[in-house]
Image: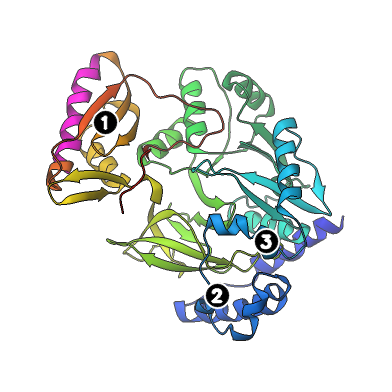
Amino acid sequence: MLFKLKIIKYWLRFRFRGTFSNRESLESYQKKSFQKFVSNVLVHSPFYSPYIKNIKSFTDVPVIQKKQFIEQFDSINTVGLKLEEAMNVALEAEKTRDFAPVINTISVGLSTGTSGHRGIFIVSENERAAWTAMVMTRVLKPKLFKRQKVAFFLRANNNLYTSVNSLLFEFRYFDIFKPLEILAKELEQFNPDCIAAQPSVLMDLCRLSIKGKLHVSATKIISFAEVLENEHKKLIEETFNCPITEVYQCTEGFLGVSCQYGVMHLNEDIIHVEKETIEDNRFYPIITDFTRSSQPVVRYRLDDILIEKKEKCKCGSVFNALEKIVGREDDILSFHSGKGVVFIYPDLICRRIAIQTDKFKNYKIIQTDNDTLHIYLETDLEKKEKCILEFTDAIEDLLNEYGITTTKLLFFDSIEYLAGNKFRRVESRILKEK
């Protein structure tokens, strides 16, 4: 009962806090939130406490990345947890598929992300309540006199997600390691109002629905964890006859959500985002999350490549809007040219392909070395030859513009889908020469 009251408290805070009229008022709010965060949270972190006396702004704290974040787990967290103990609990949950255990009321989760490297995240009861309230405010809005059923497709469950269960929501966890046919039957029996899953899972459900093997009447679709490609978004919305809400959520925080116009906005009332500029409106986000108290996330540099939207969004929000979440730093492709190594962003190749052809069902590009691309192409047999020619033209035209002329394109018939893995349309499997 106490936990439910905490959710209500946070929900009222988020719901009636009001909006920000301009960037100046938002930035002023962020500065005040950061100072409170320093005084109330960072003072209890052995890693950050030595900086306390000299912290006057965000830049007075060092930037940190995933490797150091894990290595310094014991000293960063404020609840005295040891990495070995937390990792053992998380790994046992993965093996048994029982995600209920906690350590002294602290929920523990394992993260692999798209990199495949193990990470660990912890959340307290207060943090779970705040997360639930934020989701209820911006993603799953309550309806009077109706309990909404939510199907959550996840690699691993966590107490963070089951916190959504209440008189307003019935949460059901769907384990994506199960065979798709079994999941489809369970989904039909549950008949949810909302389906939340990564785009690759939503596409699998689409294919079943198109074949008449899945019948659900969801009125809301939520996409998270992977890059949502435009053609996939269109097909999913047409198949389920309802709009998609895109959520930018990772183990480092609830970073953003799309507005009513389908534009992704960063949740800048709970996070501060610094932009490590790349080029052409692209940047790496460096985030500070004011809601994370058990495992502080302070000036954490993500490997995600984001593209800032140039035009102001029609919704009127002063929160930064994104044109696209491109992917990861590791998946920038690198090629040999007469002028040395040239780097090309994944979205540039995807954009050229989209302009050149739409004869494919799906595709995946894997770079195996600086001169070879493996292209896994799913298309109808009668379109295959033409599609290969159009893919070749699109990619070679782009590469030629950069003076890259020695790249081999090797085509394969199907994409290998591994249960639990995030789908990456363009993937680099080589070490970059930098």
Where residue 66 sits in the image (x, y, percent)? 54, 55
> Would you identify the image quadrant in which residue 183 lies?
top right
Q: Earlier in the sequence, mark 1 or mark 2?
A: 2
Query: Tag 2: residue type?
Result: Val
Q: Secondary structure at mark 3?
A: loop
Q: In the rendered view of the protein, which quadrant contains the C terminus?
A: bottom left
Where residue 29 sits in the image (x, y, percent)? 57, 79
**Residue shown at the point (41%, 67%) measured from the top left:** 275
Residues packed near mark 1 inside 10 Å, few (<14), some (14 to 19) or many (20 plus): some
> Would you identify the image quadrant in which residue 283 lies?
bottom left
Query: Magenta region, mostly helix, strand or loop?
Result: helix
Q: Is residue 215 magenta?
A: no
**Residue shown at the point (76%, 35%) measured from the top left:** 98
The mark closer to the camera, 1 or 2, is: 2
From the viewer's side, name the closer residue of 184 and 259. 184
Q: Which residue is mark 2?
A: 61
Q: In the rendered view of the protein, which quadrant contains the N terminus?
A: bottom right
Q: Residues under labels 1 and 2: Cα distance?
A: 47 Å
Q: Which residue is mark 3?
A: 295
- Magenta segment range? 382-398
Contact between marks 2 and 3 (CB within 8 A): the answer is no
From the viewer's side, name the closer residue of 293 and 54. 54
341 left or right, relative to 221: left
